[in-house]
Amino acid sequence: MTKQLVQMNVNGRRIEKAVEPRMLLVHFLREECQLTGAHIGCETSHCGACTVDVDGQSVKSCTHLAVQCEGSDVLTVEGLAQGAVLHAVQEGFYTQHGLQCGFCTPGMLMRAYRFLQENPNPTEEEVRSGMSGNLCRCTGYQNIVKAVLHAAAKLQQTEKVAA
Ligand code: FES
Ligand code: FES
């Protein structure tokens, strides 16, 4: 199959690769960029394990073609921390025990990251609704919700200090 050139910014790094037009974004990230944080669970847009951020929106990368991201800014879980400093959502999942096996976690973190930009001060119910496209088969959702609320509080506190 004829390959097509695609270029995008992934975690702030410009990537240009020739790929088959049918290549999914999740495969592009994992195989072409060696970023294996986005996991492949269902491949049918149900589980959210493959969630990344594309141009400021949560995207399930198993149902998005790499060539659709031409010129886009893509953020994956590998780009969340600033050096050794965890992002608030990572800290939330860590301190509130929001994971067990960790398979769903990269997708959860990326969805939580975007959700808290959409709704910086959510209620518990809003967290449940905002995260409902991401499934966890082992932790249960209590601690995941707590983790997102913890991250929301941390982000608000950080903003107050910066203001
Ligand atoms: S692997 Fe993409 S939603 Fe499940
Ligand atoms: S922590 Fe195992 S699937 Fe969520």
Image (tube, helix red, strand yellow):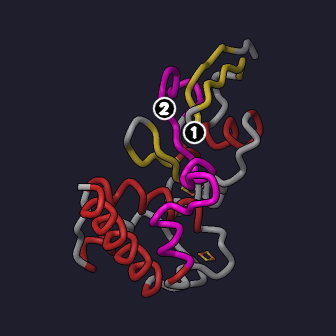
Give the alpha-carbon distance from disc 2 to disc 1, as whole Å. Answer: 8 Å
For residue 86, which numbered disc appears in the image?
Answer: none
Q: Quadrant of the C terminus?
A: bottom left
> For this rendering, which residue is in front, 155 or 50?
155
Q: Secondary structure at mark 1?
A: loop
Q: Give the residue type that dot 2 points to.
A: Asp
- Residue 127 is situated, as x and y percent measured from the top left of the image, at 31, 72
Q: Residues within 10 Å of mark 2 (few under 14, many from 20)?
A: some
- Residue 130 is situated, as x and y percent measured from the top left of the image, at 32, 65
The answer to whether the residues at label 2 and label 1 have Cβ atoms under 8 Å apart is no
Position of 143 with respect to 67 (left or right) is left
Is 115 contained in the magenta span? no
Please give the residue where the numbered disc 1 appears in the rendered image. 11
Q: Secondary structure at mark 2?
A: strand
Q: Quadrant of the N terminus?
A: top right
- Residue 62 is situated, as x and y percent measured from the top left of the image, at 58, 46
Tell which circle, 2 or 1, labels the residue nearer the N-terminal end: 1
- Picture quarter containing residue 152? bottom left
State the residue at coordinates (61%, 30%): 13
> For this rendering, which residue is in front, 62 or 80?
80
Please give the residue where the numbered disc 2 appears in the rendered image. 73
